[in-house]
Image: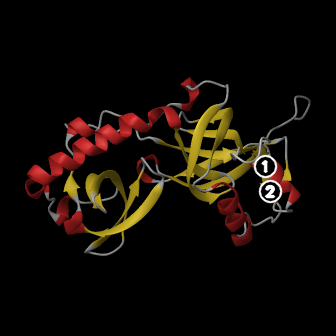
C-alpha cells in the first residue's frame, strides 16, 4: 500500500511567534508560509530526491492511466526534483500539480510525472496554509484582484513572524502576520495594513472556513459568523 504525505499539524505548533516566510499568496485569507526551522530538513530531502531521480528516474516514469487527481508524484522543476500532488487533469496529456512544500501550482505533461517512492513521503508537506486573522473582504463578493495584488506586494516572499490565533482542521491556521525589515525596527502587521488601505474590514465575530476539494486540497475561503453567547 502506498503511503500518503502528512501535513504539519497546526494544533501542535506553539502559540508564540514563529519566524516564517510567505511563499505564495492566493488571497489575504489564504497564503502559504514556510517555517524557518524546517528549511534544512527540506533541503536535505529534496537533494536526496534529486540524486535518486538522476540515478533511477527513467524507471519511475508513470503510465498516463495511473495519473489522476490525488496521485503523488516526483516532478522536475529547474535543476531540482520536487514532491507534488495532482490537483487537476486538464486534458488527456496535461495536469496541474500542487507543490505543497512550496504552496504553488505548476502545469506539466503527464509524461513529466514520476512515481514518488515511499521513502520521500514520510516528511510532512512543509508549506502551511494560513489566513490573516480578524479580517474580511470589503466587497460582499469576496476579495478583489486589487486586494490580492496588494497582499502579494506586502508579504509575498517576505520573512516575518506568524502568531497562530486559531487552528482549523489540523492544517490551516488563522494567524497574525507581521514583517520586519532590517532597515526598520517596527513590525508591520498585515491585517492592519490592509485595513488602512481600505482593502479589508476588521471583524472580530467572523472565522475563516475553507472549502476542501478532493484529497484535502484547500480551494477557497468562506466566512462564518460566530454566534454571541446570548444569541439563539
Identify the residue shown where x is 26% and y is 75%: 92
Residue placed most toward the observer, 93 or 156: 156
Disc 2: which residue = 194
- Asked if 11 appears above or below 48 in the picture, the reply is above
Disc 1: which residue = 191
Considering every residue shown, the one lying at the far front of the view is 183
Residue placed most toward the observer, 19 or 89: 19
Quarter of the picture holding the C terminus? top right
Identify the residue shown where x is 81% and y is 66%: 139
Name the colouring of the figure: secondary structure
Residue 122 shown left or right of residue 27 in the figure = left
Quarter of the picture holding the N terminus? top left
Residue 166 on image: x %, y %: 68, 33
Residue 123 on image: x %, y %: 34, 34
Mark 2 to mark 1 CA distance (whole Å): 5 Å
Q: Secondary structure at mark 1?
A: helix
Identify the residue shown where x is 86% and y is 62%: 198
Q: Does the image show residue 227? A: yes
- The answer to whether mark 2 and mark 1 are in CB contact below 8 A is yes
Residue 59 shown left or right of residue 69 in the figure = left
Q: Secondary structure at mark 2?
A: helix
Residue 48 shown left or right of residue 194 in the figure = left
Residue 107 on image: x %, y %: 36, 69
- Asked if 184 appears above or below 75 in the picture, the reply is above
Q: Does the image show residue 4? A: no
Residue placed most toward the observer, 192 or 168: 192
Residue 197 on image: x %, y %: 85, 62
- Asked if 7 appears above or below 154 in the picture, the reply is above
How many marks on residues?
Answer: 2
Identify the residue shown where x is 25% and y is 74%: 93
Amino acid at each position: 500500500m502506498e503511503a500518503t504525505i502528512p501535513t504539519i499539524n497546526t494544533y501542535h505548533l506553539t502559540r508564540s511567534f514563529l519566524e516564517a516566510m510567505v511563499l505564495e499568496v492566493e488571497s489575504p485569507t489564504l497564503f502559504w508560509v514556510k517555517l524557518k526551522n524546517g528549511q534544512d530538513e527540506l533541503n536535505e530531502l529534496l537533494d536526496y530526491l534529486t540524486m535518486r531521480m538522476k540515478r533511477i528516474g527513467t524507471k519511475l516514469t508513470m503510465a498516463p492511466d495511473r495519473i489522476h487527481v490525488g496521485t503523488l508524484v516526483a516532478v522536475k522543476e529547474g535543476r531540482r526534483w520536487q514532491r507534488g500532488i495532482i490537483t487537476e487533469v486538464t486534458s488527456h496529456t496535461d495536469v496541474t500539480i500542487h507543490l505543497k512544500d512550496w504552496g504553488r501550482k505548476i502545469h506539466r505533461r503527464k509524461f513529466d510525472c514520476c512515481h514518488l517512492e515511499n521513502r520521500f513521503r514520510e516528511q510532512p508537506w512543509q508549506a502551511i496554509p494560513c489566513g490573516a486573522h480578524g479580517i474580511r473582504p470589503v466587497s460582499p463578493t469576496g476579495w478583489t484582484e486589487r486586494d490580492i495584488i496588494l497582499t502579494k506586494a506586502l508579504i509575498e516572499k517576505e520573512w516575518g513572524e506568524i502568531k497562530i490565533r486559531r487552528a482549523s482542521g489540523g492544517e490551516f491556521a488563522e494567524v497574525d502576520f507581521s514583517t520586519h525589515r532590517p532597515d526598520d525596527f517596527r513590525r508591520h502587521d498585515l491585517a492592519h495594513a490592509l485595513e488602512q488601505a481600505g482593502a479589508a474590514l476588521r471583524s472580530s465575530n467572523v472565522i475563516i472556513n475553507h472549502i476542501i476539494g478532493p484529497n484535502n486540497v484547500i480551494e477557497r475561503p468562506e466566512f462564518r459568523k460566530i454566534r454571541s453567547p446570548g444569541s439563539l
